[in-house]
Image (cartoon, helix red, strand yellow):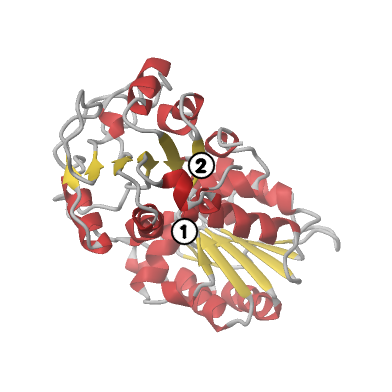
Amino acid sequence: MRLLSQLSQDQLFGKKVLVRGDLDVALSESGEILEEFRLEKLVPTLQFLLKNQVKKIVIIGHLGRPWGDKGNKGDWGILSLDRVAAKLSELLGQPIQKLDEIVPSNLPEDKILMLENLRFDPREESNDEEFACQLSKLADLFVNDSFATCHRPHASMVGIPKFLPSYAGLQLEKEVEVLSKVMTNPKRPLAVLIGGAKLETKVPVIDNFLGKAETILVGGKIGFDPSVEKYGHTPLDPVVLPVDFIGDKRDIGPETVKVFADIIQTAATIIWNGPMGMFEDPAYKEGTENIARAVVSSNAYKVVGGGDTVEVLRTLALLDKMDFVSTGGGAMLEFLSGKTLPGISSLE
């Protein structure tokens, strides 16, 4: 993977740089930004480019699903990047000029620009080559710093690198470095905590860590799914399933919390993705919150990811207690399941 961090000032000076940022922040119903985590992680890459005296930075990215899950056009006003540009400008301490176009014919003189939501144009998700080519003509080189989208074979992930010298940004580099290390050479014992509701994304992670992790703790909706009952029945099987629950299997119960917490305290490395129950309902948040506190109190190297997990830790003011917080949800899961992410392979 080619890295931005390895480029010298001579290689960057006076260049126009197209930066694929992770702009997909959580929004309120009125469109207000609820968290700045992903934007904060983009700032170091932008600072690196400014320090090395690039001529112009053109930021591209997406926000939400403008066409909806079924391809129907939704409320595009909320999903415009105006608020994102304003917030990123505040975090960076530099003016960012937001453009209303996705592919402008001419670029203004401003040092830092942000184009409109890429997903307003259906060619982004269909990986249209002409669309990728049009975007590539805006710059001299391309930097991908959006790990959370690297599992998507979209135009801004795999199309643009066909036309421009392309590099991984500082956050993307760190994501690959940390996740690769905890997968292949972690401090042991390694405990993997898997929760949430999407069985199809979590089971491959469980399977990939069989034989690699000392313990795999499975909670959330998937912990009670009949399809995971095949795990945990032999002395060599590291999978630990819930032993009790709250409500109609909507949260892990106190005995499960105790079993999980005892294992967590013995771990030297912890990887956690996914809540232990329906944490968004106050009646079923206790299991996830107790596990979060157990993770924080351990002496292990702690790696967490996934929007829901990050949200729980942020709400509890525990996010800064983690050693590494991934910006990826689905991308982190696919990476941990051993898959090759198209957004990363396109930089090789």
Q: In which quarter of the image is residue 192?
A: bottom right
Mark toward the viewer: 2 or 1: 2
Q: Nearer the viewer, residue 8 or 21?
A: 8
Q: Which residue is drawn at 71% across and 79% down?
A: 266
| Residue that label 2 marks | 167
Earlier-in-chain disc, 2 versus 1? 2
Q: How far apart are marks 2 and 1 (CA)?
A: 48 Å
Q: Residues within 10 Å of mark 2 (few under 14, many from 20)?
A: many
- Residue at far front of view: 10
Q: How crowded is mark 1: few (under 14 residues within 10 Å), some or many (20 or more)?
A: few
Residue 184: x and y in percent read 74, 56
Callout 2: SS: strand
Q: What residue type is labelled 2?
A: Tyr
Q: What residue type is labelled 1?
A: Asp
- Residue at far top of view: 130
Q: Residue at x 42, y 63 (%)?
A: 310
Q: Work out which quarter of the rendered image holds the C terminus and state it.
A: top right
Q: Which mark is residue 248?
A: 1
